[in-house]
Amino acid sequence: MTVTRIIIDTDPGVDDAAAIWLALASPEIELLGVTTVAGNVPLEATYANACRIVGLSGRADVPVMAGARGPLLRDQVFGKYAAIGAFPKALVPDSGMTSSDENAVAFIARTARGAAREGRPVTICAIGPLTNVAMALRLHPEVAQGIERIVVMGGAFRALGHRTPWAEFNVYADPHAAQIVLGSGVPITMFPLDVTLQALFTATHIEELREQGGAPGCALARLLTEFDRSDPEKYGRPGGPLHDPMTIAWLVAPELFSGRRAAVGVQVGGSTSGHTYADFNDSQARTTVMTDVNEPGYIALVVDRIAALGAAPERTAQEETKK
């Protein structure tokens, strides 16, 4: 089995929690660290949420670092649930975990440099605004040599945006950072709304997360119940998307997805700031834009693995007989 070494750069967020737990539940993934950025909520809350997410899985060995507290140039915007801040303890219990004092950008740069020296480049899964990743690439140009690929949840092409009619939130929150990352020369795999909106999690899937009793699965079920994403009028059927775990699912089971090479650009100013556009006819493009997902396969992977994370092993028949 090939193991992919990754850093998750994130702004938790319900989707982000699912992505982190999926990575921690997958033996195909070695999670080197979680770096946080302001986005869905302010930086203090993204850091606190990331510590709770990792701590609830029992993985105190995975460091969590705080990074940029705002975008490179534009005025700051937050996500739909910014006022909530840190997850309520009733939904995601506080494990008491605190982590590294190292800055997220410094950690990305240091890890990538070490990976380059070892000849074992790392993968960055960027599931929030791209500020930390852009700063690492711009401030430390040699960092690109230690990054095998950047897997981005962001952008929208044929799909309408979800923060504005023309833009997906992660790109909209820091379009200048997205422009830097997309122009870095590092291979990019991009999961836009066009593909993430194809897979909808329903009440049945939420109940399945609870069934095995693992703390992360139960917490995700509570989050999805509290912040209901089901919108039949918007999506045409019951259920709601979990965007960010697709970046991890692709690393674990790439056969569930298909995509096309494209040169991707970002509008960084004006009334349509954050809009992404793609040229699918550029044969030299280094970005792969995902276009389709096997919905049942993706949902089963996410639900089964997160539900089992931290769950008590089933009693053997012999143990049951002794009772």
Image (cartoon, rainbow, N blue to C red):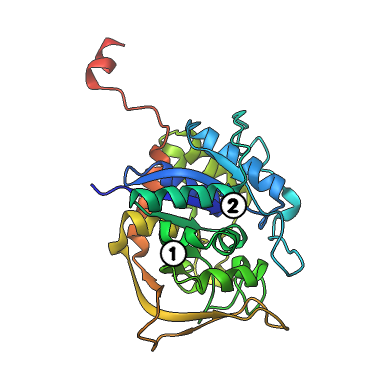
The residue wearing badge 2 is 105
Residue type for callout 1? Ala
Is 314 located above or below residue 14 in the figure?
A: above
Q: CA distance from mark 1 to mark 2?
A: 32 Å
Q: What label does residue 199 carry, if any? A: 1
Residue type for callout 2? Val
Between 137 and 272, the residue placed more toward the observer is 137
Q: In x, y percent, where is residue 202? A: 48, 56
Is 43 located above or below residue 258 in the figure?
A: above
| Residue at x-position 37% and y-position 72% | 292
| Residue at x-position 50% and y-position 51% | 8
> Do we see residue 208 in this rendering?
no
Q: Disc 1 vs disc 2: which is toward the camera? A: 2
Q: In x, y percent, where is residue 291? A: 40, 74
Q: Label 2 near label 1: C-beta < 8 Å?
A: no
Report crowding for label 2: few under 14, some 14 to 19, many 20 or more residues within 10 A (C-alpha): many
> Do we see residue 56 in this rendering?
yes
Q: In x, y percent, where is residue 208? A: 42, 44
Mark 1 residue element: loop
Between 163 and 277, the residue placed more toward the observer is 277
